[in-house]
Amino acid sequence: MEYVSRVPRPPLDGLIDDLYYLEGARPYARLTLPPTPAALLIVNLGAPFLIRAGADVEAAEYADGCVVTPPTRAYEFGYPPRTRSVGVHLKPWGLAPFLPMPAAELCDRPVTVEQVWGRRAVAELRDRLTSAEGPHEMLTLLEEELMRRLGDATGLGLVRHTSRVIAATRGAVAIDELRASAGVSSTHLARRFKDLVGVTPKRLARTYRFTATVLAIDPAEPIDWADLASGAGYFDQAHFGHEFRAFTGLTPTRYVEVRRRFLEEHPGHVLDGWPLPTD
């Protein structure tokens, strides 16, 4: 599988972690993506793929691509034998300047790129990307499109600053502290977050804490779950286990078993950091 990525130029780098190109055979037909404090935009250039946004909903097909705000639950992605796409990994607030609607309307409701930018515009973009000479030219075209579509978002400075505080503390910060530091009411802060991120600052903090904790796990080493939970600020191991299942649908021990399987079957794979085989 070929994977090429790079950080965009300013001012996009304040909204986007990286632009990427991905092509090849996925390691599994279905992958689970646990919640992360990030948004995602995919422009699909291959066969359609499926997304199931939670265990209680049906999978939906995406032909042109998808737009995903920071999720509150694990998503299941179903792929064709080979996939080809360009995409954007965005900071939690990064989608807001490109959306024609409040981010809260998309919370746990992935939409197609056409629903956000329009069918004709997306068709033209996909044609240009398909005609490009290689991954680097494709990423340049995508960056130019994002620069052209960059708009304003009321309250972005407030949400960006507060989100960075949450990230710096790995979610271990009281919301009252965030409110007092920002000099706004809790209601105002929550409203701005839902408009620009899709979730409240409290929910985003939960996701940051969970993600930081899980990414610190080395599946190849013995794990002291009680010590891990305590170090991450969870009330006790039972609280950590409940949060783990709520975010991933798996128990902590089952998660490690699935991660080990992925690493054993596909050592060094470009997707070996966070996606999991569907259990």
Image: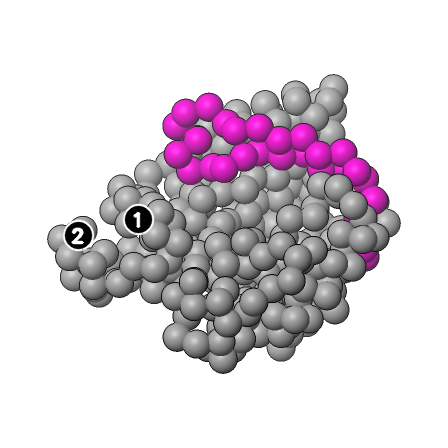
Q: Quadrant of residue 120 in the image?
A: top right
- As helix, strand or loop, the secondary structure at mark 1 comes to helix
Residue furthest out toward the bottom = 238
Magenta run includes residue 11: yes
- Badge 2 is on which residue? 181
Residue 70, horizontal then vertical, whole percent: 48, 56
The amino acid type, in three-letter code, at marker 2 is: Ser
Name the residue rendered at 83%, 52% in the picture: 265
- Badge 1 is on which residue? 165
Q: Is residue 154 left or right of residue 10?
A: left
The amino acid type, in three-letter code, at marker 1 is: Val
- Dot 2 alpha-carbon crowd within 10 angstroms: few under 14, some 14 to 19, many 20 or more: few
Name the residue rendered at 62%, 31% in the picture: 5
Residue furthest out toward the right = 81
- As helix, strand or loop, the secondary structure at mark 2 comes to helix
Residue 238, horizontal then vertical, whole percent: 49, 80
* Number of numbered discs on residues: 2
Name the residue rendered at 43%, 68% in the picture: 230
- Dot 1 alpha-carbon crowd within 10 angstroms: few under 14, some 14 to 19, many 20 or more: some
Q: Are marks 1 and 2 in contact (CB under 8 Å)?
A: yes
Q: Is residue 129 left or right of residue 186?
A: right
Numbered range of the magenta stretch: 1-29
Residue 232, horizontal then vertical, whole percent: 43, 62
Quadrant of image for the N terminus: top right
Residue 108, horizontal then vertical, whole percent: 52, 64
Q: Which mark is residue 198?
A: none
Q: Quadrant of residue 59 in the image?
A: bottom right
